[in-house]
Image (spheres, helix red, strand yellow):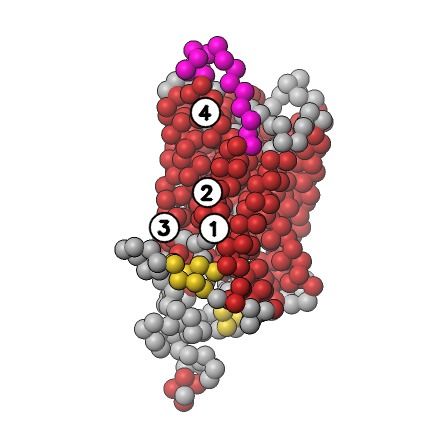
Amino acid sequence: MGENQAFGISNDVVPQGGSKCFDDDGRLKRTGTVWTASAHIITAVIGSGVLSLAWATAQLGWVAGPAVMFLFSMVTYYTSVLLSACYRSGDPVSGKRNYTYMDAVQANLGGWNVKLCGVVQYANIVGVAIGYTIASAISMMAIKRSNCFHASGGKDPCQINSNPYMIAFGVVEIVFSQIKDFDQLWWLSIVASVMSFTYSTIGLGLGVAQIAANGKIGGSLTGISIGTVTQTQKVWRSFQALGDIAFAYSYSIILIEIQDTLKSPPSEAKTMKKATLVSVSVTTLFYMLCGAAGYAAFGDMAPGNLLTGFGFYNPYWLLDIANAAIVIHLVGAYQVYCQPLFAFVEKYASEKSPDSDFITKDIDVPIPGFRPYKLNLFRLVWRTAFVIVTTVISMLLPFFNDVVGFLGALGFWPLTVYYPVEMYIAQKKIPKWSSRWLCLQTLSFACLMISIAAAAGSIAGVVLDLKSYKPFKTSF
């Protein structure tokens, strides 16, 4: 023990690398790397959000659109680095681990902050699950409609009800939701990342082809023109576009959970910083290209969902591939996002009823050629119920763009900016009113204003949608 104390390691912590099978906290050795963390982040980030970026760019124009995207990428990268430093309390190499975002808030801020963080984080996860269910149904219907349209030679309008597609997506999610935790999800994340590149690249290629067909670059410096929309609509739409872009970048709600899969040494914060740089750079490049290509192709008429906006153009099989890639990607992204909520509920239940076999007992289910699958009845019932509830809500609320914008606005400031900044100030003991403290608070306040504006724009969009809305009767 004397050697441990000489190196500044507390007596109650097993030193890093002290065992071949276990980490310093007694859990099985973590195996995550920069690349698995980047795959998880890219899976979470290049989600359906990328498809609304051409529309967002159209509202803001050639100057503000790319500038806002770049600004959000810088803010996301900076605050993610601040947040990753909160994974361990005290020493960045051997300090106590915080396994979840809420644990980090508890360790650094405590009090009412913890409950508020939990409410915002988990409400956001439920919202993302709903948004992804809607987006996947839209893509599945786009495939069905394009095939129907070509089979009928354009004579059939091909109206399709969205409910069966949302139910089908829900059934698939029920199966995948039985994957126990992040460590076992890495393969799904890599498949989903490949899919996100596939459909983003197809969207980009089709945008470029459309620009070539038009013979000119659409759009203007200031965005959608007054006349196409009223002045009030222009303001609301610009606010909503901010929310869409915020949603497209936000992954802070699962950052700590992803960081908890990383092996060390080097310290998890260092690895996470690299993974954040890789993933934010890659996503920003894709976002800029997809947003710009979509806006240049369609101008003021840029659609809310880039791939469905190409209508029934040939080659329609290429659009089918892109939409199928979206659906496969969303299956993985849904799981990556929901893991923190699944883990929180299961941990809470086992702490409340440690003696309940229903909650704690695993049943070995033999799988020929593989290790037996450990089936937990509580996990089966609770995760299935969660997927069913989010699917039903999706069938009630099929407004993709407005839902996406509202979620982005709701989760962006508290989770991506406020908590990382406040925890960093507390951790580094930055004195109040010092120049560094003032800079961090100014950043936080500016992002709060953006969040409020974006939420207002999205609510206005939802109110407009509700005027022509019938529950469970949505068809496209």
Q: Which residue is mark 4?
A: 144
Q: Image quadrant of residue 392?
A: top right
The relative height of residue 190 versus residue 137 in the rendered view (above or below) is: below
Mark 2 is on which residue type?
A: Val
Residue 172: numbered disc: 2
Horizontally, residue 23 falls left or right of residue 428, namely: left
Q: Secondary structure at mark 1?
A: loop
Query: Residue 461: x percent and y percent?
Result: 67, 31
Residues drawn in magenta: 149-163
Mark 1 is on which residue type?
A: Ser
The residue at 43%/11% (across/down) is 153
Q: Residue furthest left?
A: 369
Mark 1: give few (<14), some (14-19) or many (20+) Cα within 10 Å. many
Residue 187: numbered disc: 3
Mark 4: give few (<14), some (14-19) or many (20+) Cα within 10 Å. some
Horizontally, residue 130 falls left or right of residue 457, namely: left
Q: Image quadrant of residue 37?
A: bottom left
- CA–CA distance in space, label 3 to label 4: 28 Å
The mark closer to the camera, 3 or 4, is 4
Question: Is 150 included in the stretch rendered in magenta?
Answer: yes
Q: Which residue is mark 1?
A: 177
